[in-house]
Amino acid sequence: MLKSNGLKNDFKVLTYDIYCTNQSLEGLSENEMKKACIRLRSCNNGDYKVQNNLIRDLNIQEISDFELANFENSLLELGYKKIFDTTKRDFHYSKDGMNSRSEILLVF
C-alpha cells in the first residue's frame, strides 16, 4: 500500500534488546522499568551496545555475541539478572516533499 502511493523504504533495522536489573520492577510503568535496567542492544545482528549502564565500575561499552554469555555471568555476580528481552523490526517510508516519515514497527 505504501509503495503503491509512491513511498520508498529508506530505513530498516532488526533490533534485539536484553534488559537486566537488580531491582524489583513490580508496580513500575514500562518507562520506569527500562530506566531501572541495563540494556544490551544489537542492531541487525551486530555487536551489543551496553546502554543505560547503572554500574559505575563497568567500563564496557560494546560486547560481541561470542562474549554475551560471559558478560551476563558477570552481571549475575553483581546481582543483576536478565528480566526480559524484545525483538522488533522497524521500517521507515517517505517520499519527496514529505516533512516526516511513516514508520511501521513489528514487535515479536
Image: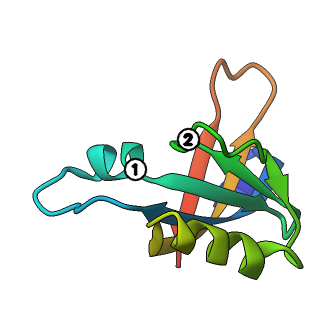
Q: Is residue 42 left or right of residue 18?
A: right
Q: Callout 2: helix, strand or loop?
A: loop
Pick whichever, 76 or 96, lies toward us.
Answer: 76
Q: Which residue is drawn at 28% across and 52% down?
A: 30
Question: Residue 75, how many percent across, how many down?
Answer: 58, 66
At label 2, which amino acid type do we have? Asn
Q: Is residue 101 left or right of residue 26?
A: right
Q: Residue at x 36, y 48 (%)?
A: 36
Using the rendered view, name the quadrant where residue 17 is placed. bottom right
Above or below, 93 relative to 56? below
Q: Which residue lies furthest to the left in this view?
A: 27
Indicate which label's residue lies in the foreground, 2 or 1.
2
Q: Callout 1: helix, strand or loop?
A: helix
Question: Residue 13, how many percent across, how many down?
Answer: 77, 58
Above or below, 47 relative to 60? below
Q: Are marks 2 and 1 in contact (CB under 8 Å)?
A: yes
At label 1, which amino acid type do we have? Lys
Question: Residue 67, how many percent across, how many down?
Answer: 85, 74
The numbered disc on residue 52 is 2
Using the rendered view, name the quadrant where residue 84 is placed. bottom left
Task: Name the residue tied to disc 1.
Answer: 34
| Residue 9 in sight | no
